[in-house]
Image (spheres, rainbow, N blue to C red):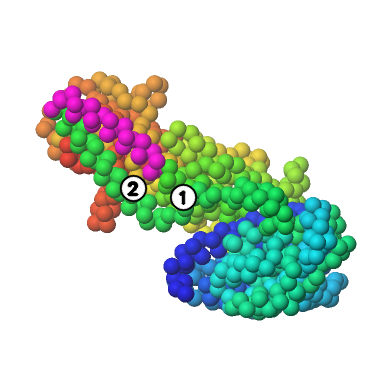
Amino acid sequence: MEMSQYLEIFIEESKENLQACNEQLLALEKHPNDLSIVNEIFRAAHTLKGMAATMGYDDLANLTHKMENVLDGIRNGVLAVTPGILDVVFQAVDDLEAMVFSIADGGDGKRDVSDVVRLLQQIESGDAPGTAAEQEVAATATALPSRLTYEAYEQTVIEEAIEQGFKCFEISVSLREDCLLKAARVYMVFELLEKDGEVIKSDPPVDQLEEERFDRDFTVSILTMESAESMAGKVESVSEIDRVSISPIETGTFRSSEDTFTESSPEKIQHEIVEKSTPRLKEENAENVKKAAPSSKTIRVNIDRLDILMNLFEELVIDRGRLEEISKQFDNPELNETVERMTRISGDLQSIILNMRMVPVETVFNRFPRMVRQLAKDLDKQIELEIEGAETELDRTVIDEIGDPLVHLIRNAIDHGIETPEVRTKHGKEPFGTVKLKAYHSGNHVFIELEDDGAGINKEKVLQKAIDKGIVSSDQALTLSDRQIYELILSSGFSTAEKLSDISGRGVGLDVVRSTIESLGGSITIDSTVGEGSRFSIQLPLTLSIIAVMLVDVKSEKYAIPLSSIIETAIIKKEDVLHAHNQKVIDFRGKVVPLLFLEEVFEVPSEGDEADQYSIVLVRKGEKTAALVVDSFIGQQEVVLKSLGHYLNDIFAISGATILGDGQVALIIDCNALIH
């Protein structure tokens, strides 16, 4: 069978299963006696093992199998959940993730996992009490699978059938390890059995068998007039069957679901009736199965296809603008009506396409609980991570870029912000530190806030360090606001760490955070109170492809200013312009705002005549504002942001370009760079 076509699905689903393992292991650490969590981890690991074996990644399947053995010991009550066991299982999951990422990068998924395998085997067969019992249970389960449990009405059906001369058998089937099409073999077994009898139930349930969510073994309960030898022979005739065992069920030897509830794990309680011996029950069951089977309403689409769709739609937006221009020139009522309708429809299409590209930020947030646990352990701190608004959606392009900045911020909060339990207790705080990660929508932006209840930022220390490193002068330091002082920690090479560590101290984290966020058209602000904690707030645009802008004229050239950066527009008189520190400024609503003449910034050829009044656009970056002087305002418009390419990637204060309806190219101004 050609497996390459399934590789992408395998990689995606493997990542999902490993993420589920990580999340559930963290939950198990908090609730070590909750068997339902263990079952969830086991189910995810089991699915991963089956997929890996099918795809031929034996190392991946073998390591998962070893991990499964430990989880099985916990499920059966043979092993107790301890921090040591969890550390080893976490290590196994880390190795599995590395193997999956190796496969995703085109590798063979092989990795030296001998150390973690040895640790898992020690846990499985160590000197801990109950290990021998665990081995005995495992051996029994392999030799003769545990008998099924029956509800009261199922017992009645079987008893009535036995009275009428039928025989009831439980048939346990083991597929070969190299069986590729497990669901197909199960189907063939069921088809053979149903020719000679009525299947009562199966374990695992039918839906799990169809989806191949089982290892190699399954058990079927059947009512038939045939002999045990005859039934066993027919099942053995199916290819890729390794072993068949059959045991008769007599009246009075049932295990009821009530008994199982006290003896077995919750997973074994789950079951499903396949068919009943009476037509009425069969009909009812068929209806139930139909109701229970959920119809899939999602499909996996490669992100490259969405990018192509987005690019095509961007061209459509450009042509839409061109049509609107032509419509204004001809002023034909029918043409105007058609263009307006097309504008409405393309607007709806734009919303749908942008929503298709939206991804919940939980895809990024999900990796942080595990990281926080490890960092807390390395630093000997007690930290709880609280996540809010994980369902908030962002454009896939932004999601891909925001992960690393958030990692830097969280590492910074844990290393510099949260104190050790001893220090916290000394200052009257709880020994557990809290890091809150929150995301929410506001207008056309998404805000991500990271807050900690740690020591806060020491202003004096930050300011002195900045002066020592030459980031600011002593005179400049006197004019800085508290927030501006806090933002100095985002400067390149800045660090207040007393010693170098693997986690921080090199001064290369937070400047990357700022540059990445600003490259996405976003901004970051910092608030802090000494002794109480800090809050980093990141503002990001919903999408990077189609943006709303204000079009302006600067002499013969057109420029676009993103609406997200604009505070307001105004017209001022020439005599209102003041001079301060060799720079032109204005007093706008009681605040001194510097003037930037775009014709000078972008060296636009000037005719020499100077106007009596200036048209200005007030823009902001955090707390800083500036007034951009333009010739005139054209109006607001949605435009497609296009890159200038590799040859023009270092043009000052220009983030891209767009094609207007009349075919002209307008450059899009990067207000962050201008104010910086």
Q: What secondary structure prevails in the magenta region?
A: helix
The structure residue drawn at horizontal position 21% and vertical position 32%, both measured from the top left corner, is 324
Residue type at mark 2 is Met
Q: Quadrant of residue 262?
A: bottom right
> Depth check: 558 or 642 in front?
642
| Residue position for label 1 | 399
In the image, residue 214 sits, relative to residue 522, either above or below, namely: below
Left or right of residue 315, residue 59 in this image: right
> Depth check: 636 or 557 in front?
636
Left or right of residue 561, residue 65 in this image: right
How far across and down, in percent of the image, does residue 418 sit? 65, 49
In the image, residue 64 sits, relative to residue 673, either above or below, namely: below
How far across and down, in percent of the image, does residue 542 sit? 43, 41
The structure residue drawn at horizontal position 40% and vertical position 25%, both measured from the top left corner, is 591
Question: Which span of residues is magenta-colored?
Answer: 330-354
How far across and down, in percent of the image, does residue 565 sit? 37, 35
> Depth check: 244 or 346 in front?
244
Q: What is the CA distance from the residue labelled 1 to the residue labelled 2?
A: 17 Å
Residue type at mark 1 is Ile
